[in-house]
Image (cartoon, rainbow, N blue to C red):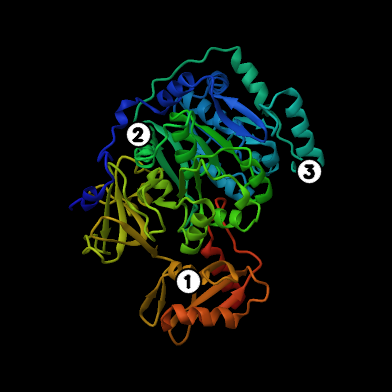
Amino acid sequence: MEKIWLKNYPANMPQEIDATQYSSLVQLLDEAMRQYADRVAFRCMGASLTYGEMDRQSANLASWLQAQGLTKGARVAVMMPNILQYPVAVAGILRAGCVVVNVNPMYTPRELEHQLHDSGAEAIIILENFASTLQAVQARGHLKHVVVASMGDLMGTLKGALTNFVVRRVRKMVPAWSLPGHVSFNSVLSKGAAKPYTPQQIGLDDVAFLQYTGGTTGVSKGATLLQRNLLSNVLQCEAWLTNGLDTSKIQQLNVVCALPLYHIFALTVCCLMGIRNGACMLLIPNPRDIAGFIKELSSFRFHMFPAVNTLYSGLMNNPDFAKLDFSSLLVTIGGGMAVQKAVAERWKAVTGTPIIEGYGLSETSPVATCNPNNIDCYTGSIGMPLPSTEVAIRDDDGKDVELGQSGEICIRGPQVMAGYWRRPEETAKVMTDDGFFKTGDVGVMDEHGFVKIVDRKKDMVLVSGFNVYPNEVEDVAVQHPGVLEAAVIGVPDKHSGEAVKLFIVKRDPDLTVEDVAEFCKQQLTGYKRPKYIEFRDELPKSNVGKILRRELRDADQKKAA
């Protein structure tokens, strides 16, 4: 297979990266924390954490974990939003030689129990706001150690106490909980400081993270990400995003971290890549609070802004966002879901900077393809394969299709996972004999090596034998000025097998079904037009803002029954 994209790489872009310049992620962390010791690494809610402080505190946490008898390879869960304790916890777990198991703080007890049991986690570091969830399942688990953090930890005595009082008493964000035998986060750091930290022998093929997938195709599975996988993707993303950017006038890169760091996109592109470059990262614990988010941005000269389509849209729907100073913004990175043309064009008009759309999955650490950072407008594609990455478009028999033909996007590269944690049968379903990961996404590649997503195989709607891809219909719908958000599913139809159903969240309260239908009629051929249109107050979304078509399908099926 010819790597046609290499001919169209931006100038000075390396074709390959070398992850062996580091022995492990821990070496990357150690070197960055010492090189940039005096710099602020993270900001959150008016408090800050320097690289030097992160170095000392993560070493204290590592020594405490080792003192509890957690050996190399032991799994430690982390259940926290974007707060200062998160990077300290992750660095400490890795430095202890353990494996980080990222947990969505919004999980229900059932979802948490599955992940703790499946990963075999021996310990968990959890924010007290979510401790009641753990309480509901603790008796049925095998956790040996529970560390409970409070929002005000690491903010200093006075500010920390005030923050905890507001969170607990004023906003009442901490449900009552009881976890016998737990230890507080700050107590762990104090106890760890009195014990020696013993650096571990960690190699590129050791497991670093268990990153659980959303479970949209079945039970949630842990993507086993090695030290090599994360290191490779950090270096790939860095080469791709920094190539051609004029950073000569920047003393320190400022990165907006609104996406949750427990999500693989933010973990790699914001946290790990940011640390390697000595960046200052602004942590946003609750990006759904758009007004509060914009207030934080007003005092932060941001250079890099990774996010998802729905977050960009939500920000621009607040009139205060346009009042911000965007003169320092160098790169906006869209991922996690398709960036819609209407959103991309509005973002460019408001900020003066295009959204550079990329693509990846938990199984690829995550970034596999990305648009070049020298684009000046929406491309509708997910870009080209990153250095050291190959993309093949294959049919159902595993054969490469002709350029311009659609097929399953398959990825090979050093960022591809080792497999699903303790699920060899599931791993075999997605890994080919020649080392490609089958994404389940349908796409096409053009003659320049740019890839365009058509849709998920399972989301495709079959209308009278014709394929309808939800992304296309959704992209059309949101271009109507009265539409805020849109989602499409297929529903059973006795005449055509399936029909297109469109869910709409209104921007204009006077919008009617007839308005939407007429607009779609003008934009879409007959079989692609929605047969059913339903207005909703909101659409179900994942923790990173991705619209969950599966939940819409399930709800629609129950209603029909």
Q: Quadrant of residue 509?
A: bottom right
Position in image of residue 181 (x %, y %): 69, 28
Between the residue at mark 3 and the residue at mark 2, the CA separation in whole angstroms equals 42 Å
Amino acid at dot 3: Lys
Between the residue at mark 2 and the residue at mark 1, the CA separation in whole angstroms equals 40 Å
Position in image of residue 127 (x %, y %): 66, 36
User: Is the Cβ of the residue at disc 2 closer than 8 Å to that at disc 1?
Assistant: no
Q: Which mark is residue 29?
A: none
Amino acid at dot 1: Val
* Local secondary structure at mark 1: helix
* Local secondary structure at mark 2: helix
Seen at 31% across and 32% down, the residue is: 19
From the image, state whether disc 2 or disc 1 is nearer to you.
Answer: 1
User: What is the crowding at mark 1: few (fewer than 14 residues within 10 Å), some, or many (at least 20)?
Assistant: some
Drawn side of residue 8 relative to residue 442, left or right: left
Residue lying furthest left: 2
* Local secondary structure at mark 3: loop
Seen at 45% across and 69% down, the residue is: 470
Between the residue at mark 3 and the residue at mark 1, the CA separation in whole angstroms equals 42 Å
**Residue behind mark 2:** 228
Q: Which mark is residue 172?
A: 3
**Residue behind mark 1:** 476
Q: Is residue 506 above or below residue 205?
A: below
Position in image of residue 350 (x %, y %): 54, 54
Q: Nearer the viewer, residue 246 or 296?
A: 246
User: What is the crowding at mark 2: few (fewer than 14 residues within 10 Å), some, or many (at least 20)?
Assistant: many
Amino acid at dot 2: Arg
